[in-house]
Amino acid sequence: MKVASKDLLLQIARDAITCHLEDRIPAKLPGLDAELLQKSGAFVTLQKGDQLRGCVGQITSDKPLYETVAQAAIAAATRDPRFHQVDLLEMPELTIEISVLTPLQPLEHLEDLEIGVHGLYIKNDTYSDLLLPQVATAYNWDRTQFLQQVCKKAQLPKEAWQDSETEIYLFSAQVFEEGD
């Protein structure tokens, strides 16, 4: 993705949050290039210093990427159940990170999972969740730990990844943040 597209997506995310908190409509965007019009899943992560402040997104989307990012940014700031809503006064203290996802691919062999390259999506019955690729790197997890942690996040037993009923998918993400 071009630097200009990344910068614009970061600005769209920040503007979407600010406009939502101020209860106003964002300014009309200039002509958007094809990268921002593609349909892709994306997550927006908010950091306050070195602390997570919100992270929400969609694995897939039927909307253009710029809309998916704007919606995920607002949700990360206002609807992440782990945190209280972001306050307008906090905005200057937040760093925004965007992860643009590739389509899901079934995990065929454990050795296909590359730490730092792949994220994981797990599903078993009505339980499902995911971890972005950068999470395993941040915590220095190996493959087994990464699989156990995505199970834990999905509220499954930590060994559920070995259950034949469990579906596991890989994806990659292009990750960029403010200040890159």
Image: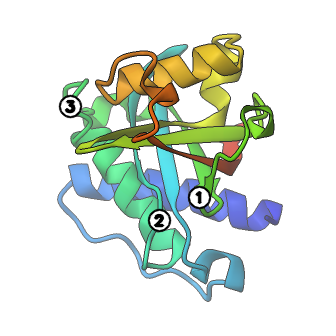
- Please state which amino acid type lies under the numbered disc 1: Leu
x then y, percent, for residue 125: 26, 44
**Label 2: few (<14), some or many (≥20) within 10 Å?**
some
Q: Tell me the CA gap for discs 3 and 2.
A: 21 Å
Mark identifier at residue 60: 2
Quadrant the C terminus occupies: top right
Q: CB atoms at circles 3 and 1 under 8 Å apart?
A: no
Q: Is residue 154 above or below residue 96?
A: above
Which is more toward the observer, 162 or 29?
A: 162
Q: CB atoms at circles 1 and 2 under 8 Å apart?
A: yes
- Of the two numbered discs 3 and 1 on the same chain, state the one appearing first in sequence: 3
Inspect this view and state whether residue 68 appears: yes
Q: Mark 3 against mark 1, which lies toward the viewer?
A: 1
The residue indicated by pointer 1 is 104
Mark identifier at residue 94: none
From the viewer's perspective, tell me whether residue 6 is left or right of residue 69: right
Q: Quadrant of residue 89?
A: top left
x then y, percent, for residue 115: 75, 28
Which is more toward the observer, 51 or 102?
A: 102
x then y, percent, for residue 16: 37, 59
Quadrant the N terminus occupies: bottom right
**SS category of the residue bearing label 1:** loop
Q: Quadrant of residue 156?
A: top left
Q: Mark 1 against mark 2, which lies toward the viewer?
A: 1
- Of the two numbered discs 1 and 2 on the same chain, state the one appearing first in sequence: 2
The residue indicated by pointer 3 is 81
